[in-house]
Amino acid sequence: MTTIGVQTMMLRDEFAEHGIVETFRRVRNIGYRAAEISAVEMSAANVAALVQVRDELGVEIASISGGLTAPDGAPSLGTHLDAFVADARALGTRMIRIGMLPAAAMASTARVEEFADRCQEVAEALREHDIALYYHNHHVDFAKYDGRYLLDVVAERSPLVGFEIDVHWVQRGGLDPVSTLRRYGADGRVAMVHLKDYRIGHLDPAVYEALDAGDQTPWQQELQHIVQFAEVGEGNLDFASIIPHSIDAGAEYLLVEQDDLYGRTVWDALQTSHDNLVGLGYADLF
């Protein structure tokens, strides 16, 4: 059964102000009952709070996040694998996801291949604990290296690594989300999909005032930021097709995420996405 949940990156300020449990209580009241944990320090206290969220509020923990490397000696999958395994077991999840490759890994084909090979090694180690490793795409994963998308290099050299397809970043990378789900989900490797819409925003009225005054600089600057993240159903993506194809690809979790709220509250955004998904006929996935 596929479940719609939230990606906690967008809740990090709420966690800091109100705490994990109370924040999730409000998330659960909207209707979400699953979460991917990201942007949360996995301290003993926070893990205990997440266990409470699972046990008392009934929120499934879809996955936790980690990187092959981490800044300033922070825990990484390369240095503290046992800690990630322990956290996954405590929270009842069998999935760990890498949110993005290190920037240096994009420098050359050899660097991309080295990253993919390391992912395979970590996936092999996690498999011994009945935990699977997944990789989340951005638009940069559709840069070509010797004629192959970066994501294809990972797919080919890391056969044990699954995918978390982010449909907004697929669209921003110039590909069709449905075709991409078919391509990377054909062999059952897509277990999670990020739901965020892709919107072409309106320019600030000040831009037009400047144009009327003969100044094109604000227009040229704002055009660089006109592509926006959006609540599900508030942009141009065809979620009536994306969601069925996500389910067909075997996705266990569809995770609502929005990288920028453009002045709205996170609660308004999560409510809008929830209501639009219900309106599309997916109430049974909450």
Image (tube, rainbow, N blue to C red):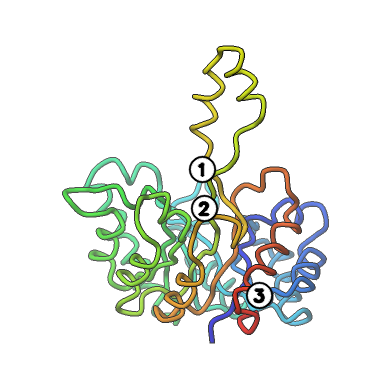
Q: CA distance from mark 1 to mark 2?
A: 7 Å
Residue identified by numbered label 2: 198
Residue at the outermost top position: 214
Residue at the outermost front position: 212
Residue identified by numbered label 1: 227
Q: Amino acid at mark 3?
A: Val
Q: Are marks 3 and 1 in contact (CB under 8 Å)?
A: no
Tell me the quadrant of the picture where the N terminus can be found. bottom right
Q: Are marks 1 and 2 in contact (CB under 8 Å)?
A: yes
Q: CA distance from mark 3 to mark 2?
A: 19 Å
Q: Is residue 51 above or below residue 104?
A: below
Q: Residue at x 59, y 67 (%)?
A: 36
* Left or right, 31 with reference to 214: right
Q: Is residue 281 above or below residue 138?
A: below
- Residue 159, percent from left and from top: 28, 71
**Dot 2 alpha-carbon crowd within 10 angstroms: few under 14, some 14 to 19, many 20 or more:** many
